[in-house]
């Protein structure tokens, strides 16, 4: 408390003046603003504090919930009034009113009391709309389709054996389905709940509903599926209306031709739908999917999530989604079996974002043209053209070009292409609906750019439409080092391209949810994007993927059972322990720990059974490290190091989770087991003479330090060995997918960001700079940027975390939850003269903006309400320091080359004028004397 008063006095502000009225903003329900389709029985409510004062804190709150907004206007919580709760909790406050009803809108607002006991005004009213909470809430809706798949045709799990006759020569009908209905009285609200497998596009009265792409999110369809909720009130009209649905395959059905990583058949495309109509007179009506719906084959004649999509425009049926369409020739839909469980899709959907135009167009053959779109991204081609009816134009996407300038798919699976058959209208436009790909180049065969006059169909325009998960961007970063800015964009494009309804490895070859990326690169993503709801989906995907023996496989959803380490690798499966814990640390979500706890217990029990004297040695190890061979499984680090270190990390996390959940016996049990693993690990791998682990690789030593397996007596020596190994490799990286994140964390935590700078500020050794020098526009699969590996892969994107946490210096304080306590500790390394980063934490926006000029260092920070920060700036005991223009006594905060300040919320400018050269703990820079 005394520190807060001193801060106010330094700023020249009296405590009375500082007590500003607190306001409330950014009200969320289950991570979303005014969400629709929430099926949690006790949704979590959150809000942010704002105000012009400093040190704003919450000491109490009150929440009102009602089923109509008029009650809230009178400050009546008809369903729940929390009363005044003495607590600073402003995140993840669970609703504790009566049981929620399905398909119902609830309204809520909140007020808080600040640090001096002053109440705020009520917040604006927010709302959430519940989904369908039980199977009965679907009002007898049926799963329906064009035809029912015979049980003998099912391929679950998927297969990869191309000698299996089921692997080849299979195709299915991609249907249209429609239903007409009448509205005869004034409508109050209309809500659609729909799932179409594998993917669907919903139309109402001739127009697509919403702007989603590839709904619903991918799941393990023999266990569960997701439904999507839309408010369609504005799309309906008095009188006749028509529902229309177009279905695609996705992972539900993968045909047996063209390229495919795997082939599966859960069933033929199908849907389930409930349209809930609420009239102004208080009555309701439901339009549900059943055999009265009509169906016909659509103009999409081939659809594969891997191989491409074909569209025959001559098969279009204009007006098929309009009320006036004559569907007499269509047949009735058939009832089919669907997944046993349906859940609301709460993660952000995929949407189309950037639109790229060609930067170069090249003719490579008599009827072949190649469009360079300038950016390798997850995308779909969009073409407008004019030509004769029945002419087929082939579109081939690719990351790279061959020596002859043609599309090169050799590293990521071939053939992948789109066929478009013209209907012969003046100008017709098309883009795929149910497939995307990772590409920079578009090769077109059978058409030519307009004006070339060669008798081929004329291409009027060509675009690349980037599609990704629509998670909000919540982080920004820039600095004076242009290579770092380019590296940031390189990593970011790989993240954008691989954040779908799962966190994929690549947007072309596999599109699978390899789990190690979620915990290793997850922190980099979380600084940049609001992926809280997506992480929750990944957790549930793992719960569904876990086997009876407790194994969490390397991918989730697990469509196919891979062999050996590609199914059972602790560095991948441990995501089942680590991701829920990281979600709690980043978002304050304790419920995810409760939901995940049985999965966690079963997985560590599985690992214990696999261990030999507490040592694990199976899996893939430090995937794609740099050794003498082409990258793949670990070359420089024994698998026992990475597998056992992860096992120990799992146990240490599980002990903490058990403590949080009040499971004392479990906490003691797993702590004791972790200690036994630690002793065995050090006996097996640590050399107390050389102060190295196993081979002494970057990964072996870094993981041992980060996981706290290293005895404190030896920690400094091990860290020095890490630095020595990096220097011995010409400041080069050898760590791979698993080890590199921990290498960066250890160097950052130990004040050696100068080493991180030296490793990543060059282009002549394997790393980000070399990939950029080779022309990469998205992060590649290999440090070397090899052509015969994926050129859009985000598994090595760990440096983005350091841009925020190290260079800019925004990091959570130890044991903090959701950045309520944070550290601002910038690292001005190398030739970097300024860096600025912002991150919208659950409590609000955090900003760290620093620059150094001659002997002056300036740091501007913003700390959100209801939080506390420890701020470090480089300084010496003789420095002159001002805080918001007011001189402060440096001796009260000086510590080991830094001036340290404790503060609450507010905006601050710290200016340090040094009389002598300054060196940080990392030896990273020196000021010039004036």
Image (tube, rainbow, N blue to C red):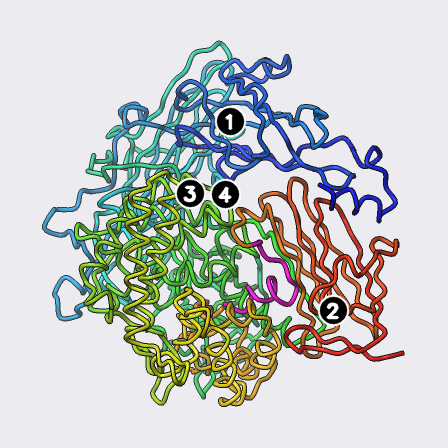
Q: Residue at x 69, y 57 (%)?
A: 871
Query: Residue lying furthest front in this view?
Result: 713
Q: Indicate the quadrant where residue 643 lies.
A: bottom left
- The residue lying toward the viewer, choosing from 416 and 701, is 701
Disc 1 or 4, which lies upstream in sequence?
1
Q: Are marks 1 and 4 in contact (CB under 8 Å)?
A: no
Placement of 333 over or under 355, stated as above or below: above
Q: Residues within 10 Å of mark 4 (few under 14, many from 20)?
A: many
Disc 3 or 4, which lies upstream in sequence?
3
Q: Are marks 4 and 2 in contact (CB under 8 Å)?
A: no
Q: Label 1's element? A: helix
Q: Residue 488 appears at what percent x and percent y? A: 59, 68
Q: Is residue 307 visible?
A: no
Where does label 3 land, which residue?
318
Q: Indicate the quadrant where residue 891 lies.
A: bottom right
In the rendered structure, which segment of residues is drawn in magenta?
Answer: 798-813
- The residue lying toward the viewer, choosing from 631 and 246, is 631
Where does label 1 land, which residue?
233
| Mark 3–mark 2 distance (CA, rounded to whole Å) | 58 Å
Disc 3 or 2, which lies upstream in sequence?
3
Residue 804 located within the stretch drawn in magenta: yes
| Mark 4–mark 2 distance (CA, rounded to whole Å) | 32 Å
Q: Which mark is residue 834?
A: 2
In front: label 2 or label 1: 2
Residue 197 located within the stretch drawn in magenta: no
Q: Residues within 10 Å of mark 2 (few under 14, many from 20)?
A: many
């Amino acid at each position: 408390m005394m520190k807060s008063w001193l801060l106010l006095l330094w700023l020249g502000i009296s405590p009375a003046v500082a007590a500003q009225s607190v306001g409330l903003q950014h009200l969320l329900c289950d991570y979303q603003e005014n969400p629709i389709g929430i099926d949690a029985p006790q949704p979590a409510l959150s809000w942010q504090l704002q105000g012009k004062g400093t040190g704003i804190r919450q000491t109490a709150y009150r929440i009102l919930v009602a089923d109509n907004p008029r009650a809230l206007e009178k400050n009546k919580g008809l369903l729940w009034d929390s009363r005044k709760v003495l607590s600073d909790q402003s995140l993840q406050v669970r609703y504790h009113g009566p049981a929620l009803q399905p398909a119902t809108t609830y309204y809520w607002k909140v007020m808080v009391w600040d640090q001096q006991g002053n109440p705020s005004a009520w917040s604006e009213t927010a709302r959430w709309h519940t989904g369908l909470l039980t199977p009965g809430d679907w009002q007898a809706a049926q799963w329906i389709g064009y035809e029912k798949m015979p049980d003998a045709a099912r391929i679950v799990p998927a297969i990869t054996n191309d000698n299996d006759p089921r692997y080849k020569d299979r195709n299915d009908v991609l249907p249209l389905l429609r239903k007409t209905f009448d509205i005869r009285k004034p409508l109050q609200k209309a809500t659609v709940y729909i799932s179409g497998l594998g993917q669907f596009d919903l139309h109402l009265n001739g127009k697509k509903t919403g702007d989603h792409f590839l709904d619903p999110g991918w799941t393990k369809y023999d266990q569960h599926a997701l439904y999507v909720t839309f408010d369609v009130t504005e799309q309906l009209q008095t009188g006749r209306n028509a529902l229309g649905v177009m279905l695609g395959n996705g992972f539900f059905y993968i045909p047996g031709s063209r390229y495919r990583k795997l082939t599966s058949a859960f069933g033929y495309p199908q849907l389930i739908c409930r349209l809930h109509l609420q009239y102004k007179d208080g009555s309701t009506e439901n339009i549900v999917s059943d055999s009265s719906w009509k169906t016909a084959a659509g103009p999409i004649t081939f659809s594969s999530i891997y191989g491409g999509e074909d569209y025959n425009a001559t098969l279009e049926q204009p007006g098929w989604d309009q009320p006036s369409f004559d569907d007499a020739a269509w047949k009735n839909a058939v009832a089919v079996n669907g997944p046993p469980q349906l859940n609301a899709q709460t993660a952000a959907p995929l949407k189309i974002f950037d639109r790229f135009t060609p930067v170069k167009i090249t003719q490579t053959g008599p009827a072949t043209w190649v469009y360079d779109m300038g950016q390798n991204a997850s995308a779909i081609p969009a073409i407008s053209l004019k030509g004769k009816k029945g002419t087929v134009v082939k579109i081939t996407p690719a990351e790279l070009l061959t020596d002859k300038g043609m599309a090169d798919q050799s590293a990521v699976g071939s053939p992948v292409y789109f066929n478009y058959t013209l209907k012969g209208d003046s100008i017709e436009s098309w883009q795929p609906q149910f497939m995307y790909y990772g590409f920079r180049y578009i090769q077109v065969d059978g058409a030519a750019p307009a004006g070339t006059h060669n008798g081929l169909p004329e291409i009027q325009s060509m675009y690349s439409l980037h599609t990704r998960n629509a998670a909000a961007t919540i982080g920004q970063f820039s600095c004076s080092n242009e290579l770092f800015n380019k590296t940031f964009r390189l990593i970011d494009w790989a993240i954008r391209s691989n954040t779908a309804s799962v966190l994929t490895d690549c947007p072309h070859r596999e599109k699978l949810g390899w789990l190690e990326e979620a915990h290793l690169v997850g922190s980099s993503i979380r600084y940049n994007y609001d992926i809280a709801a997506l992480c929750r989906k990944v957790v549930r995907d793992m719960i569904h993927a876990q086997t009876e023996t407790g194994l969490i496989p390397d991918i989730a959803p697990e469509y196919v059972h891979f062999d050996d380490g590609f199914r059972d690798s602790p560095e991948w499966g441990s995501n089942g322990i680590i991701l829920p814990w990281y979600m709690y640390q980043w978002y304050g979500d304790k419920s995810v720990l409760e939901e995940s706890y049985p999965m966690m217990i079963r997985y560590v029990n599985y690992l214990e059974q696999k261990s030999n004297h507490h040592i694990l040695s199976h899996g893939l190890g430090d995937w794609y490290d740099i050794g003498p061979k082409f990258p793949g499984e670990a070359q420089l680090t024994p698998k026992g190091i990475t597998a056992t270190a992860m096992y120990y990390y799992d146990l240490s996390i599980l002990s903490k989770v058990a403590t949080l959940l009040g499971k004392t016996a479990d906490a003691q049990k797993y702590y004791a087991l972790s200690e036994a693993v630690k002793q065995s690990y050090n006996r097996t791998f640590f050399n107390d003479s050389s102060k190295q682990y196993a081979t002494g690789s970057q990964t072996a030593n870094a993981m041992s330090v980060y996981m706290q397996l290293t005895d404190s007596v030896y920690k400094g020596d091990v860290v020095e060995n890490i630095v020595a190994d990096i220097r011995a490799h010409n400041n080069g990286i050898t760590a791979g997918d698993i080890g590199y994140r921990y290498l960066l964390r250890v160097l950052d935590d130990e004040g050696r960001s100068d080493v991180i700078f030296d490793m990543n500020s060059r282009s002549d050794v394997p790393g980000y700079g070399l990939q950029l020098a080779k022309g990469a526009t998205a992060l590649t699969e290999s440090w070397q940027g090899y052509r015969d590996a994926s050129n859009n892969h985000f598994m090595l994107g760990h440096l983005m975390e350091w841009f925020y946490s190290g260079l800019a210096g925004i990091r959570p304080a130890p044991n903090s939850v959701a950045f309520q306590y944070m550290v601002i500790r910038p690292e001005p390394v190398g030739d970097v003269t300024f860096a600025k980063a912002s991150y919208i934490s659950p409590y609000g926006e955090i900003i760290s903006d620093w620059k150094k000029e001659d002997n002056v260092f300036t740091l501007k920070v913003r700390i959100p309400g209801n939080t506390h920060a420890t701020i470090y700036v480089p300084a010496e005991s003789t420095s002159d320091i001002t805080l918001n223009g007011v001189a402060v006594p440096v001796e009260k905060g000086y510590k080991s080359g830094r001036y340290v300040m404790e503060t609450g919320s507010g905006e601050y400018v710290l200016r340090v004028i040094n009389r002598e050269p300054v060196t940080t703990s990392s030896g990273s820079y020196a000021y010039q004397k004036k």
